Structures are given as structure tokens and as C-alpha cells.
Amino acid sequence: MVYFSSWRAMQIVMDIDMKQFVSFVSKEFHHIFRDRTTMAILLLLPILMLILFGYAINTEIRNTRIAIYDPSNDEATRAIAEKLDASEYFTVIKYLNHPADVELEFLKGSVQMVVSFSQNFYENMTRTGDAQIALITDGTDPNSAKTVATYATSILGQYQQEKFRVETIPYHIDTHLKLLYNPQMKGAYNFVPGVMGMILMLICAMMTSISIAREKEMGTMEVLLVSPVKPLVMIIAKTIPYFFLSLVNLTTILLLSVFLLGVPIAGSFFWLIVLSLIYLFVNLSLGLVISSFAQSQLVALLMSGMVLMIPVIMLSGLMFPVENMPKFFQVLSQIIPAKWYIVGVKKIMIKGLSLSAITLELGILLGMAVMLIGISLKKFKHRLE
Amino acid sequence: MQKEKVIIVEKLTKRFGQFVAVDNISFEVERGEIFGFLGANGAGKTTAMRMLCGLSIPTSGKGLVAGYDIHHQSELVKRNIGYMSQKFALYEDLTVAENIWVYGGIYGVPQKEIAKRTDELLQKLGFESERNALVKSLPLGWKQKLAFSVAIFHRPKIVFLDEPTGGVDPVTRRQFWEMIYDAADQGITAFVTTHYMDEAEYCNRVSIMVDGRIEALDSPQNLKKQFNAQDMDGVFQQLARNANSNGY
């Protein structure tokens, strides 16, 4: 009889908690669905970002205007100029007659690169191996200058290889550039993982922290704290809608990148999803941690904007390669979850590597998730003294 | 016949470091009573109320709310009380019916019962046509009434009202107090903090806190007699004059 009644009591407690949970989660969905503008923005954001990165902020080069200074004017120099012109990257718009014209062209801004050959180019190339080409670029925009030079070097390399195959003369080869995994140097290979890292973080961390801060601002948090809702129920209920929204966005991004941008999923789809799910948990708990500091929506927004967005854009390798950063920032970038996620996604999605290649990334993200969930739970309980 | 005691507080104390926010207070509240909990800002009434709601753990002393120990059974305390604060604490972006549904669900009221009580409630308030209106579109006074109705929707034994009438016009305040009386008639004890001394007159009994201690506790009538004051404001002024916390 005693056994029976305690079982009943337990059932009632479980029953109430489940109902609590259901009404809480559906409340959160109501908040999101009611605010149509925000929901539309959240759903369209990945599409917008992919288009922006894919077409507007294009780091690829196409039909770059170049000029050529060619005092040799021989078989080799003409072939190289033709090869540059024939490529989709460059258009030769001018032949210069005098070395002094080089700077003039840059000052006018009519070209982005000048290819300058040395005297007696062909002869030197075949005999002494001392043929020289100067690639002169506009350093006011170092990023695109570097890209343009890299493309040109790659074309010169191709020319040398072709020559080497046809004739048996020992050419002097000084460039050897090979782009693995991304032979066409498509920017999409870099920014698709980056956009994934950014969008998922934005939705999970920012929106979760804002929605909790809103409860504090409106005074509803006080009522919830007095109610029998357990903090854990509240936390999970808060995160579930944004978790689903992120899954929708993840699907959108992957579909767009495969079918519109032509970036295939080279590796295991399963492990890509597992990696993404862990990354989602990291960001959801990051949002919870932020919300325990932020008392208003504005503060939550600023904190997630400043503390999350800017470092992710700057330090995750999305815009600038981590290897080129000063040591301090390289170290700093190690604590940014997005950095690990982006590296992991690149390994699986672009390089097609297997699970063994991303164990480090998985492990670190998992560790971050556990740590942040722990902190947020502790912080949440702490509010109740 | 002695009435049921729904709040029993014995020597309740809360310290924050050296500072004693609530100093050894003791009182009892009966079922169906409207109990006014007065004090200047900083006198410790919010801290005391937080302890009674299970939000804050007492440093020492004992408290029973709705028959449960506030230290060790805060979960059960929370199930049996309602709470409403100066901020309305309704979700502005949800409809009237959705708000009721959410709070009903949080307190574990069964679905069928929620539907039934919602109909009754909306009819009583005359809000039937506002059932599906967003709360943010309602006038202030309506929100207040709705917030109170939501706070007692799960039929709690006690409802804690933390300055419930702040920023509301006198007519709505009057109507609001009628609702409190109504709830008290149904056996729901109301524990009210307020800054309005005329509202203190509406209470069955009033306690006045000064510097963490309860300096006076009786019906408004007896207090006025005891302090030889014309109204509750006079009583309050006499007590608050000696307080350290005055001037907050």
C-alpha cells in the first residue's frame, strides 16, 4: 500500500513536470512565430550571407586588367602573355613601351598588375636559366595583390610544366604552386564552412541570450523563479526552439552550397552533422552563460555582438588565415569555438577526411560544451542563492 | 474555532555578510486573511518576502508557508503559492488565452481544467472578446487584473503581491482591491506589500518593518489607536522616523 502510494506520488510529479515542459517549450515557439520579422530574418540570414560572400565579397579574381612590359618580345614572352590573357583571370589591356610607364599605369589605376619580362627572355630561359619575370601589383590592397600574384604565378608554373614536357631542355623552374582540394581556387570552399560557423553561432548564442534577457527585462523571470519550474526545465525549453531553427538553417546552407555554389560534401555526412550538433550545444550554452550576465536584451545583444561575432569574423580564419596572425592572436583564436568548428568542417566537407582526422576538433568542442553547460547551470542556480 | 494558519514565521533572520537584512522576525497569518506587509525601502520586506517564496534561504529561524518548510521544502511551497509583482509579468507577445495556458501549464493544472477555468475567468472579467487579443494591446488596468487572475489561476493557498498597484490610477486600484477581497472570500490568503498608506487601511492586519525588525503588527484600527494617529500614514511616519534606513 505504501509502495503503491509513493508510486502514485512519483507519477504525479513526473506528469506535472512533463506538462510544464510542454507548455514551456510551446510558449517559446509562440514567441518566435509571433515575431514574424525576426523569424524571417533568421531564416533568410543564411541565404543572404551565402549570396553576399558568394557574389559580393568575392575574393576570387576574374578578368583582372593587366599590362605587359616586354622588351624581349620573343617566342616565350608572347606565349606567356597569351596564356595569361587566355585565362579567365586576366585580360591584357595594354603593352607598355617604357619601364617608367609602369608606375604611370598604377597611378591612373587602369591596371591591377604589370608583368615585366627581362631582356632576352627566351635565350636566358633556355641557356643560362636566368630568365626573369617581375609581377608588379598594387600594394594598396594587399589581399587582392597577393591573390592576383598567386594566380599569375600558378599560370606561369603551368607554362613551364608544359614546356618541360614538350622539349627536353633543362628549364629553370622557380615556381611550383599546387592547390590541393580546391584546384580552381574557389572562394566558396573557404566561406561555406565560415558562414556555417557564423550563422549557427548567431542563432544559438545570440538568440538564446536575448530571449532569456527579455524575460528578465519584462519581469516574467521573477514570476518563473517563484513558480515550481525547475531551472533545468527552463533552460532546456529556452534552447529547443533555437536548436530547431539552427537545424533548418544548417539544411539551407548545405543545400545551397551543394546545389548553388557547387561545394560538395566530400566526406562523411554523418560526422559533419555530429560535429555541427556538438557545435550547436557549445553555442546554446554560450548563450546561456551570456544571459546570466546580461540583464537586458540590449546588453545581451551587445555582448554577443562584441564578444562573439567580432572575434569569430576576425580570428576564426573566416576572413584572414590564422597562420598569418601575430602569435598573440593565434593563441587567442584557439579558445574560439567557431575556429575549431570551421577547421573541422573544412576537413570533412572539403578535404573528405574521415573521423580520425577531426578527433581533436570534436574533442575540444565537446570539452567546451561540457564546460559551458556546467557554468550556465551553476550560474542559473546561483541566482536562487 | 481557531482558524488555520497558512504562514508561520519564527525568529526568521537573513544576513548578508555583516548586514542583517531581516532581524529575528516572527508572525503568523491566517487563512483568508489580507495581510499588509509595510516598510520603507531597504527595511527588509523584499528580502523577507523572497524567503517566504522559497527564493532565498534563511540564515536562521523557521518558516512554514502553506504548511511546508521554506528551507527544505521550497519546491512544495512554490507549488502552493501565487505571485504577482509590480511589473505585470505577462507575456506581451502572447494572447490573453495563451498567457493563461502557459501559467496554468507551469503550475500543472490539467488541460481540461485550464479550458474550463479560462472560460469562467474571461466571463467574470468581461474579457471574452479579448480572448485572442495580444496582451500588449490591453489597457494598463486590464493587464493588472489579468495578471492577478493568472497569479491565482492554480488556486494557491497564498498569493504574494509585491507592490501590485504601482503606477495605476485610483479607480483601477479600487477595482483591484475588490478582486483581492473576492479572492480572500474564496479562502486565498493575500500577502501584500505596498507604498500606499490608504491601501494599508484595506488590510485585515498590517505589519510594519523598520531596519529588518517588525515594529508593529495589528489591525489598522488598533494601530491607529496605539500610535494615536489619524490614519495609517501617521502610524507609519512615527515608526519610520527613527529608522536608519529612512532616506533611502
Image: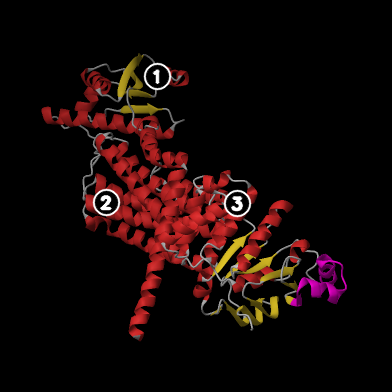
Q: CA distance from mark 2 to mark 1?
A: 53 Å
State the residue at coordinates (14%, 29%): A169
Q: Going by the image, does A159 lie left or right of A10?
A: left
Marks 2, 1 in one chain: yes
Q: Secondary structure at mark 1?
A: loop
Could you say which quadrant of the image residue A367 lies in?
Answer: bottom left
Q: Residues within 10 Å of mark 3 (few under 14, many from 20)?
A: some
Q: Nearer the viewer, mark 3 or mark 2?
A: 3
How many numbered tags mark residues here? Answer: 3
From the viewer's perspective, is residue A281 above or below residue A80? below
The residue tagged 3 is: B143
Residues marked 2 and 1 touching at CB (< 8 Å) = no
The residue tagged 1 is: A99
Q: How is the image coloured?
A: secondary structure
**Which quarter of the figure is the N terminus of chain A placed in?**
bottom left
Please name the amino acid that badge 1 sits on. Answer: Pro
State the residue at coordinates (60%, 61%): B84
Chain ID, mark 3: B
Please provide the residue range marked out in magenta: B214-243
Could you say which quadrant of the image residue B244 lies in?
Answer: bottom right
State the residue at coordinates (32%, 22%): A63
Q: Residues within 10 Å of mark 2 (few under 14, many from 20)?
A: many
Please name the amino acid that badge 3 sits on. Answer: Lys
Please name the amino acid that badge 2 sits on. Answer: Leu
Residue A74, horizontal then vertical, whole percent: 23, 17
Q: Secondary structure at mark 2?
A: helix
Chain ID, mark 1: A
The residue tagged 2 is: A272
Q: Nearer the viewer, mark 1 or mark 3?
A: 3
Looking at the image, the residue that sits furthest to the bottom is: A2
Instruction: Note whether residue A174 is visible.
Output: no
